[in-house]
């Protein structure tokens, strides 16, 4: 599916439906800019200030929405790489990152329930599948990172977890940093007893997914 673009006088909005996890941050943020259930054009970048449009787009956790400012002041990598553990939902990364070597938007959501048909990306099947997993994992002892940003490499392992290499802070759904890592493995089969981290359960349950 092609990326949809709406260009205003000062900012353009790009929408990639394949990435959308229906967080509804956009339509709740400003239903005049993002018109819900509209027939035809639903993106109206001139219906609010460029700053407001930018702020709402930045709140899209999956990177389905991105923006392009006419003045060239586009989105930049965050100062701190984070992954937020969504309650009963995906892993929401905010970082300059690659997935299987492919550069990503600065925001991307990856499946951790094992049910997505668009692996490694979330496609919201955790909802219909009744996936249950805390968004408040236990805090682990960790030292402050010497650098908190930089490129994050996410490598889905064949029939296994997400291997993540780079500076990363693991953040709970309520915003608490619960771990700091430079390399870790996140569960994506949905069966780990140590979520969000892998504990080898993918082997016991016969999890199947493409990867390196």
Image: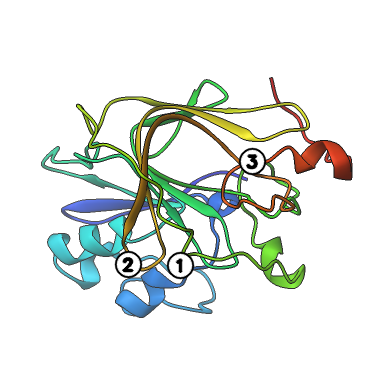
Q: State yes or no: discs 1 and 2 in contact (Cβ < 8 Å).
A: yes
Q: Is residue 209 above or below residue 174?
A: above
Mark 1–mark 2 distance (CA, rounded to whole Å): 8 Å
- Which residue is the site of mark 1? 41
Q: Is residue 50 left or right of residue 105?
A: left
**Mark 1 or 3: the one toward you:** 3
Judged from the image, the secondary structure of the residue bearing numbered disc 2 is loop
Instruction: Return the disc, 1 or 3, that comes first in the chain's sequence.
Output: 1
Q: Residue at x 76, y 54 (%)?
A: 115
Which of the two residues, 110 or 201, is positioned nearer the viewer here? 201
- Which residue is the site of mark 2? 44
Hey, which quadrant is residue 2 in on the image? top right
Image position, residue 47 (x, y; %): 23, 72
Mark 2–mark 3 distance (CA, rounded to whole Å): 42 Å
Q: Residue at x 28, y 51 (%)?
A: 12
Q: Number of numbered discs present?
A: 3
Q: Residue at x 10, y 42 (%)?
A: 71
Q: Is residue 39 left or right of residue 98?
A: right
- Which residue is the site of mark 3? 198
Q: Residue at x 64, y 41 (%)?
A: 198
Mark 2: few/some/many CA within 10 Å (<14, 14-19, 20+): some
Judged from the image, the secondary structure of the residue bearing numbered disc 1 is loop
Q: Which mark is residue 205?
A: none
């Amino acid at each position: 599916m092609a990326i949809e673009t709406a260009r205003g006088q000062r900012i353009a909005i790009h929408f990639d439906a394949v990435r959308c996890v229906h967080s509804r941050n956009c339509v709740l943020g400003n239903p005049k800019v993002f018109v819900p259930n509209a027939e035809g054009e639903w993106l109206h970048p001139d219906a609010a200030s460029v700053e407001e449009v930018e702020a709402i787009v930045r709140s899209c956790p999956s990177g389905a929405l991105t923006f392009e400012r006419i003045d060239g002041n586009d989105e930049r990598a965050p100062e701190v790489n984070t992954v937020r553990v969504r309650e009963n939902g995906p892993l929401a990364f905010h970082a300059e990152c690659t997935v299987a070597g492919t550069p990503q938007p600065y925001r991307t959501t990856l499946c951790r329930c094992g049910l997505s048909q668009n692996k490694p990306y979330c496609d919201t099947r955790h909802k219909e599948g009744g996936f249950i997993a805390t968004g408040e994992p236990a805090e682990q002892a960790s030292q402050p990172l010497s650098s908190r940003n930089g490129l994050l490499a996410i490598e889905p392992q064949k029939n296994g977890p997400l291997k993540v290499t780079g500076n990363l802070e693991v953040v709970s759904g309520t915003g608490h940093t619960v771990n700091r890592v430079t390399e870790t493995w996140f569960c994506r089969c949905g069966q780990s007893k140590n979520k969000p981290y892998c504990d080898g359960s993918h082997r016991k349950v016969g999890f199947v997914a493409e990867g390196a």
